[in-house]
Amino acid sequence: MEVYIDDMLVKSVEEQDHIKDLVECFQILETFGMKLNPAKCTFGVRGGKFLGYMISERGIEANPEKINAIMNMSPPRSIKEVQKLAGRLAALNRFISRSADKGLPFFKILRGVAKFEWNKTSQEAFDTLKRYLVSPPLLTKPMTGETLYLYMAISESAVSSVLVRQEKREHHPVYYVSKVLQGAEPRYSQIEKLALSLVTAARKLRPYFQSHQVIILTNHPLKQVLASPELSGRMVKWAVELSEFGIEFRPRPAIKAQVLADFIVELAYDEASMSTPTWSLYVDGSSTSTGSGAGIVIESPQGDKFEYAIKLEYPSSNNEAEYEAFLAGGELALAAGAKKISRVNNSAADQLARLASSMAAIRNRRITFISSERAAIEEQEEIMCADPTPFSWKEEIIRFLTDGIEPETKKTLKP
């Protein structure tokens, strides 16, 4: 039995159990003095409209009336008609793969309300949406305790995800989620956009994340970044928010389900079309009488800067401090999702290194302080020192003069 405010649905897996389930439901209603409107009750149906969706034993389908409302529309000729199209599109969001990307041309028109312009890009997006709605996907309902899987996709202007369940080695979609990037979000790094996609899905599908084990399928190091979220304040916030769910990360396998073809093909296209961005790494080391330190500045392709000052808790030279900075900077950049790193001017990193060596107080807390107690490559302990120098005739003379030990050969005794 499922209850949505003032709507109730009694479902039975087996037909012969339905009468027994109804009797139990009526007993509960009678116990609490609740009454039903007979005119709004329907019994013994195999499918029908519920909460605006078509429910049947096959799964959850989009309401044909809502689909026809878009299919029968002509190209909008005013802002008001675009608003009507956007509203109808929002009603079908959970059935549309990457709905934010598909509706982005319409949203851009609404942003410039002062001037209406329906161009070629808008018409192509309108035609693509209609072709997609010709055969909308069939959504399924997960079973209690069933493991669910989440696929994510990102683009320059939107993040999307799809929650799926596995049945007989096939994946069936449960819910599509999509979000248009706003404000500073389009300038996020690729790994931050993936994290935002995960957080958006967790917020939207909170009941699923709370009652099911969710496995995130991705080939990006998202788990490592969330486990070391010192890269930015928002990553810390997202990591804490996601910690309440039983999330597991696995590599994304090949997808054979035809129903997910649109989502996965677009994801593969986006990944292939994205050129490998170049990250900039600035490192420097400093050794003073008060201690040693390392300075690191990491700059993302979008221009975001992450500054670190590392206090080395062991004696080291300038060169050793710089090596430590380079190794630590590489690890931090890789954790942020960098694959191509360019090492350039180190003036800012030099100031951070001197700051870390003295650990002077600063007002701007955007700089992250890290204390390193051990060197990345520890010095090997010398256990035994063997003299590789071969035996010399001088050794016998030295032993005779110092210890009085006569040489074994008489030739050495000759003056």
Image (cartoon, helix red, strand yellow):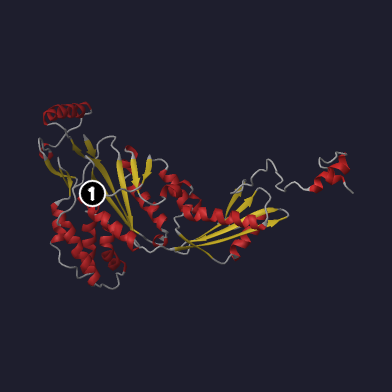
The image shows residue 145 at horizontal and vertical percentages of 29, 35
User: Which residue lies at the image location 20% right of the left edge and 50% below the top edge?
Assistant: 259
In this rendering, does residue 380 appear at all?
yes
Q: Looking at the rendering, which quadrant does residue 345 occupy? A: bottom right
Lateral position of residue 51 relative to residue 370, left or right? left
Above or below for 130 versus 248? below
Q: What residue type is labelled 1?
A: Lys
Q: Which residue is found at the position 38% from the left and 64% from the top?
A: 275
Relative height, residue 273 to residue 331 (above, below):
below
Tell me what residue is drawn at x 21 percent, y 43 percent: 140
Mark count: 1
- Considering the numbered disc 1 on the image, is that residue within a helix, a strand or a loop? loop
Residue under label 1, please give it: 256
364 and 266: which one is in front? 266
Tell me the crowding category of disc 1: few under 14, some 14 to 19, or many 20 or more residues within 10 angstroms, Cα based. Answer: few
Which one is in front, 349 or 211?
349
122 vs 324, nearest the viewer: 324
In the figure, 336 relative to 117: above or below? above
Which quadrant is home to the N terminus?
top left
Measuring from the top left, give residue 308's x and y in whole percent.
57, 55
Is residue 360 among what the camera can see? no
Residue 66 rendering spot, x and y as whole percentages: 16, 54
On the image, the x and y values in percent for residue 106 come to 26, 65
Q: For residue 110, what is the image quadrant?
A: bottom left
Q: Is residue 400 left or right of residue 107?
A: right
Q: In this view, does 272 lie to the left or right of 228?
A: left
When asked about the image quadrant of residue 329, the answer is bottom right
- Front residue of 377/35: it is 377
